[in-house]
Structures are given as C-alpha cells and as structure tokens.
Image (cartoon, rainbow, N blue to C red):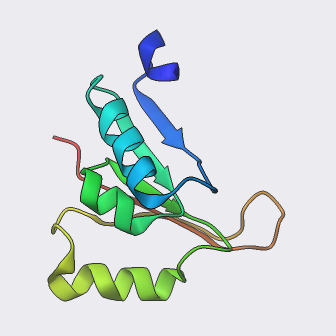
C-alpha cells in the first residue's frame, strides 16, 4: 500500500468493492496518517472521516452533492474546494471536496 511508503495523500479508487469493505480499507489507510481521498463515494468519505472525495462523470451529480453538504448533513468544513471545468479533455465535469486542513 502506498501509505506504507510514507506518502502524504492517497486516492482510493475501488469501483467494485462492497461498501463495508471499502469503509474498512479507508479507515485502515487513514490510520497511517496519510490524507485519504475516496473516489466516487461521498458516503464512504464522510463515514470514514476521509480528507476528501473526488466525484467524476459517473458519480453522484455535483449539484446534488453540493446541495446535500450545504444542507447541514456534512461537516461544515467538507465543502467544495476545487471545481475543474473539464477533466483532461474528457468533457466531463469533476468536483472535489476536501476537509479544511489545519
């Protein structure tokens, strides 16, 4: 695992893993001290205390994720921090959420 090598940030991109298994993986990775970004799974990112989530073209629509986070259902610091116009020529919009890093 990359976190064993001492990296600061890790993006976990498990598309086929069951929710509970993914949640356990993210929590285990976070124990190393690395900041974890979860790909496509806002629910797992929030439940695990991950540093953020990356939502791509096949994820929860960005508009819905923003509305849900602003409704008070997510920690106040877990709001959109970066919004890319298009993802490297793919034509898809991407949205990333990050916890405020103190």
In the image, residue 44 lies at what x, y percent?
37, 60
- Depth check: give the residue in front, 46 or 24: 24
Q: Is residue 46 above or below residue 91?
A: above
Of residues 43 and 83, the one drawn nearer to the viewer in this rendering: 43
Q: What residue is rendered at 68% in x and 73% in y?
A: 57
Vertical placement of residue 66 versus 59, above or below: below
The quarter of the picture where residue 28 lies is top left
Please provide percent x and percent y for residue 51. Answer: 32, 47
Q: Nearer the viewer, residue 44 or 37?
A: 44
Q: Quadrant of the C terminus?
A: top left
Q: x, y percentage for residue 70?
A: 24, 83
Question: Farthest residue in the top direction?
Answer: 5
Q: Position of 98 compared to 53: left or right? A: left
How many dots with numbers? 0
Residue 87 placed where, x, y %?
Answer: 72, 62
Please identify the quarter of the rendering in which residue 71 is found. Answer: bottom left
Q: Nearer the viewer, residue 82 or 12?
A: 12
Judge from the rendering whether residue 98 lies leftward or rightward of residue 40; answer left or right.
left
In percent of the image, x 54 and y 83: which residue is there? 61
Classify 89 as above or below 13: below
The quarter of the displayed image where residue 72 is located:
bottom left
16 on left or right of 60:
right
Q: Residue at x 37, y 53 (%)?
A: 52
| Residue farthest along the right direction in this orientation | 89
């Amino acid at each position: 695992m990359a976190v064993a090598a001492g990296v600061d940030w890790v993006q976990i991109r498990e598309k086929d893993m069951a929710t509970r298994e993914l949640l356990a993986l993210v929590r285990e990775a976070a124990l190393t001290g690395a900041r974890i970004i979860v790909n496509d799974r806002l629910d797992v990112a929030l439940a695990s205390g991950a540093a953020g989530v990356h939502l791509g073209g096949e994820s929860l629509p960005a508009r819905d994720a923003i509305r849900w986070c602003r409704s008070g259902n997510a920690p106040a610091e877990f709001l959109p921090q970066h919004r890319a116009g298009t993802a490297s020529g793919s034509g898809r919009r991407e949205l990333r959420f990050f916890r405020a890093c103190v």
